Each structure stands twice: as structure tokens, then as C-alpha cells.
Image: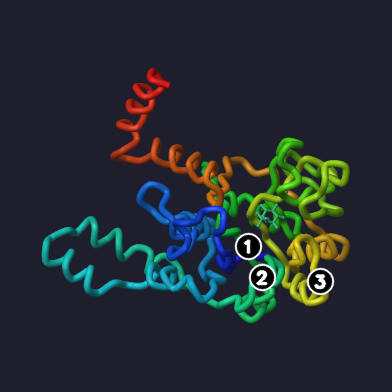
Amino acid sequence: MKVKKAVIPAAGLGTRMLPATKSIPKEMLPLVDTPVLQYLVEEAVASGIEDILIITNRSKYAIDDYFDYNPDLEARLRETGKTKELGIVRHPAEMANIFYVRQKETKGLGHAIGKARQFVGNEPFAVMLGDDIMMSEKPVLKQLIDAAEKYNASAIGTQIVSDNVISKYSSLKVSPLEDRIMKVSDMNEKPKLDEKFSNYAILGRYVLTPAVFDLIDKTEPGYGGEIQLTDALRELCKMEDMVAVDFDGKRYDTGNIKGYLEATIDFALKHEEAGQWLREFIKEKAKTL
Ligand code: G1P
């Protein structure tokens, strides 16, 4: 199994980050100086992905512009000898082959992924949720692709979360296969505490087989009245092998204020120019709190 295509659903409204997301797609908000979406594309490319489909909506044209050249800006940078900046602004346009499709109605994650059928064709493909940013040594998507190839199966990224938050995610029913890899036999979206299968939550990365598309087509609206990817995957894991990968790395939900701040601080601490300064600043600030 070779995974060369990725789908990034980025059609959500971003209501948890208003007013910033009134005119800026939430995926374009910066972590320090780089939009959230660029981290996702970088993770995909570092995992061997060549073609990426971004699922947008009618208010997200800033995304298309970002992954394109900007001749006016580039000419100015060239004239003023700003070679480093020139490289930085051209880089997003050259990272991967990026395709776009619009989800014309907001009907849920499963419905959005259904829009990728033509792009994906008959190959396994990755799904990377636009809010979920990972910090890891080995790219999290690569960890999933390696497991999917080894077991010739779909692979779902997971980590254990506490009882306080499992109801915000999907819960997986799993049995162990090897260190960090489990077999998946069931799952449910946003379970109440007494409905959870385990504390293993689905966290933003998937490798799926194209069999999921027929299942999405048959999926009735579920949690929140939306067509849930989880409901289609629940059927997929009964038809075909599926593994869960307890990935090595830290995951940030940049779609809410606390997760966004946490990611901003952690990424800033690692920043070449600002990291050391921020460390000192935080130490000084802590004395006054
Ligand atoms: C989505 C998925 C859910 C998953 C979560 C985190 O939910 O539907 O199964 O656990 O992302 O990756 P959302 O955060 O969009 O409500």
C-alpha cells in the first residue's frame, strides 16, 4: 500500500475563534508567523504525500492565494534584495500539488470527505483535520502510513484522553496488536461517558481505503444532525482491517482559544529568533503572577 494523496477538510465556520475568523479562514490563523495550514502541508510532504486536496467553502479564498505565487510582492522583495523573505513567500506555492474543492453546504465531516472521491480515485489516502496540529519527531502522518502499510489496513491516529474530554471526540474500541498499534473493531462519535468504548480518542489523522466513499454515501445524519465520518468508519472497520496508532507526539486543537494559545506558546518557544527571548519573558512574567 502506497499513500501519496491527502485530503485536508478546511470548510468549517470557525465559530469558536470569532471575531478573528469572520474574514480570515481559521486555517490561515498564524502560529507565531506561519499559518496553521502550512504546518499541515509540511507534515504531509514530510510523510511522502505528493498531492493534497483542500476542501474549502466560499469564504476561504485566502487559502488558494496563500499556496500561489504573489508576483507583486515577490518583485518588491527582489528589488530590495530581500532574498530570504523571497524564499519564504515562494515556498508554500512549491511544496506540493494542491487541489481545491468547495463543500457547498455545511453538512459535516463525512459529507466533506465525500467530496474527495474523484480526487482520490481507487487509492488509499490520508485525511488530516485542519484544526489538529502535531509536534513530533517523526511526522504523525508518517507513523500512520507506516502502520497502514505494515498491516495493509486503514489507520486511525489516537491518544488516550481523560474522561473529562472523551465526549468531545470519537471513542475507539480496540485490542492490542503491538506496542502503540491496536486493532479497531468499533467506535462512536461524541459518546456520553457511559457510552465510551475506551479513552482512546480519534485525533485528527487517518489513512483510509477508498471503500469509505460508498459507506459515506449510505451514512445517515448522526451526531449534531451531520453526516459523521466516524459513522462511516464504524462500518469500514467491520468490512476491512483497521488499526489505531497511539502516535508519538503532541497534538494541539488550534480551533479553540485555549488550544490555539497552547500551540502558539509551544511553537514560539521553538522559534529560531523568538524562542530564547520568550523563555526569558515567561520567567519574568511568572514572577508577577
Ligand atoms: C472531529 C471528529 C472526531 C474527532 C475530532 C478530533 O470532531 O468528528 O471524531 O475525534 O475531530 O480529531 P470535531 O472536533 O470536528 O467536533
Point 59% across, 67% down: residue = 7
User: Which residue position holds label 2?
Assistant: 113
User: Which residue position holds label 1?
Assistant: 127
* SS label for mark 1: strand
State ligand 1's quadrant: bottom right
Distance between the alpha carbons at the discs numbered 1 and 3: 18 Å
Q: Earlier in the sequence, mark 2 or mark 1?
A: 2
Residue at the farthest top position: 287
CB at mark 3 closer than 8 A to ligand 1? no
* Mark toward the viewer: 2 or 1: 2
Label 2 Cα crowd, 10 Å radius (few <14 / some 14-19 / many 20+) = many
User: 167 or 100, which is in the foreground?
Assistant: 167
Question: In the image, is 80 to the left or to the right of 256?
Answer: left
Q: Which mark is residue 196?
A: none
Residue 87: x and y in percent read 27, 61
Q: Earlier in the sequence, mark 3 or mark 2?
A: 2
Quadrant location, the C terminus: top left
Contact between labelled residues 1 and 2, with CB atoms less than 8 Å apart? yes
Point 59% across, 49% down: residue = 140
User: 68 or 10, which is in the foreground?
Assistant: 10
Q: Name the amino acid, label 1.
A: Val
Q: Is residue 284 above or below residue 215?
A: above
For the question of whether residue 162 can be seen, the reply is yes
Residue at the farthest left position: 80
Label 1 Cα crowd, 10 Å radius (few <14 / some 14-19 / many 20+) = many
User: Which residue position holds label 3?
Assistant: 219
Distance between the alpha carbons at the discs numbered 3 and 2: 12 Å
